[in-house]
Amino acid sequence: MSIQAINVRNQFKGQVKEIIRGDVVSEVDVQTPWGIVTSVITTRSVDDLGLTIGSEVVALVKSTEVSIAKL
């Protein structure tokens, strides 16, 4: 899957540094050149995206929400 276009302007490319798994939601820390961005997403999404330590991702920040797209 590749992202063709997206309307979120604040995008931070980085690598997954840490995943703190919960039963329903998990915290994903992304190391970017500007620092760490943390996203709280469902644990199912972590599994569906195949996120692991070192995965290359883009943190998409819109208002108070941080989404993750795996590259």
Image (spheres, grey):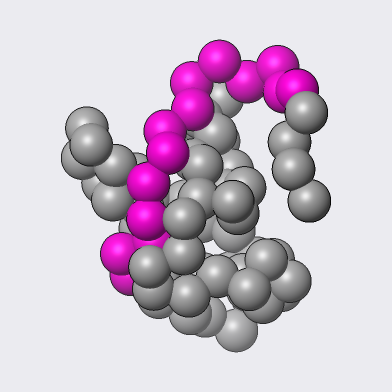
Residue sitting at x 63%, y 20%: 8
Residue 19 in view of the camera: yes
Query: Is residue 43 one of those drawn in magenta?
Result: no
How many numbered dots are placed on residues in this image?
0
Up/down of 41 relative to 69, above or below = below
Camera-nearest residue between 51 and 62? 51
At a point 37% along the width and 55% down the height, the residue shown is 15
Q: Is residue 24 above or below residue 30?
A: below
> Residue at the location (48% across, 21% down)?
10
Q: Quadrant of residue 70?
A: bottom right
Side of 55 relative to 68 (left or right): left
Magenta stretch, main secondary structure, is strand
* Residue 46 picture location, percent across and down: 61, 70
Q: Position of residue 27 (x, y in %)?
A: 44, 64
Q: Residue at x 28, y 50 (%)?
A: 31
Q: Is residue 43 above or below residue 1?
A: below
* Drawn side of residue 37 relative to residue 25, left or right: left
Residue 10 among magenta residues: yes
- Residue 7 falls in image quadrant: top right
| Start-end of magenta stretch | 5-18
Q: Is residue 63 visible?
A: no
Q: In the figure, is residue 30 to the left or right of 33?
A: right
Residue toward you, 22 or 55: 55
Point out residue 13 in the picture as x, y percentages from the top left corner: 42, 39
Query: Residue 42 in the image: x percent, y percent?
Result: 65, 65
